[in-house]
Image (cartoon, rainbow, N blue to C red):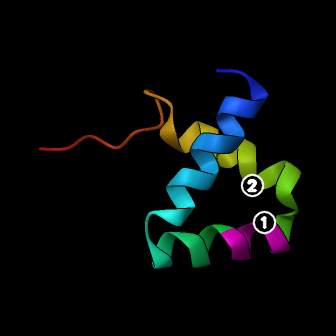
């Protein structure tokens, strides 16, 4: 994904749910956006996805 695609995916993700939005906007305020976006990318990467049973 390009930087623009990552940003759009992040925005779509946080807009999909009010709790997600609150969590990630708080994180962006706390650690700055430049840190929150890589954390989001790691969380959504195949290796960062939790196992579902």
Q: Which residues are magenta?
A: 25-29
Nearer the observer, 40 or 16: 16
Please, what secondary structure does the residue beneath circle 1 have?
helix
Q: Position of residue 20 (x, y in %)?
A: 50, 69
Is residue 3 shown above or below 7? Answer: above
Would residue 32 be counted in the magenta stretch? no
Write down the residue under mark 2. Answer: 36
Percent of width and height locating residue 26: 71, 77
Q: Nearer the viewer, residue 9 or 22?
A: 9
Taking 40 as reference, is 25 above or below it?
A: below
Q: Which quarter of the figure has residue 36? A: bottom right
User: In this image, 27 relative to 51: left or right?
Assistant: right
- In the rendered view, does 12 fall on the left or right side of 29? left
Locate the N terminus and report the quarter of the image it occupies: top right
Location of mark 1 (residue) = 28
Label 2, residues with CA under 10 Å away: few <14, some 14-19, many ≥20 = some
Q: What is the quadrant of the C terminus in the image?
A: top left
- Using the rendered view, name the quadrant where residue 31 is placed: bottom right
Q: Is residue 5 left or right of residue 49?
A: right
- Mark 1 and mark 2 in contact (Cβ < 8 Å)? yes
Q: Position of residue 15 (x, y in %)?
A: 53, 64
x and y, in percent, of residue 19 in the image: 47, 78
CA distance separating discs 2 and 1: 5 Å
Q: Residue at x 61, y 48 (%)?
A: 10
Near mark 1 (Cα within 10 A), the count class, few <14, some 14-19 or many ≥20, is some
Q: Residue at x 50, y 31 (%)?
A: 45
Confirm whether the magenta stretch covers residue 28.
Answer: yes
As drawn, the label of residue 15 is none
Q: Main secondary structure of the magenta part?
A: helix
In the image, residue 50 sits, relative to residue 13, either above or below, namely: above
Helix or strand or loop: what does disc 2 sit on? Answer: helix
* Residue 8 against residue 13 in the figure, above or below: above
């Amino acid at each position: 994904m390009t930087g623009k695609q990552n940003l759009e995916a992040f925005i779509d993700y946080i807009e999909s749910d009010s709790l997600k939005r609150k969590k990630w906007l708080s994180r962006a305020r706390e650690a700055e956006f430049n840190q929150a976006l890589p954390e989001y990318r790691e969380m959504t990467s195949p290796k960062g996805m939790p196992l579902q049973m």
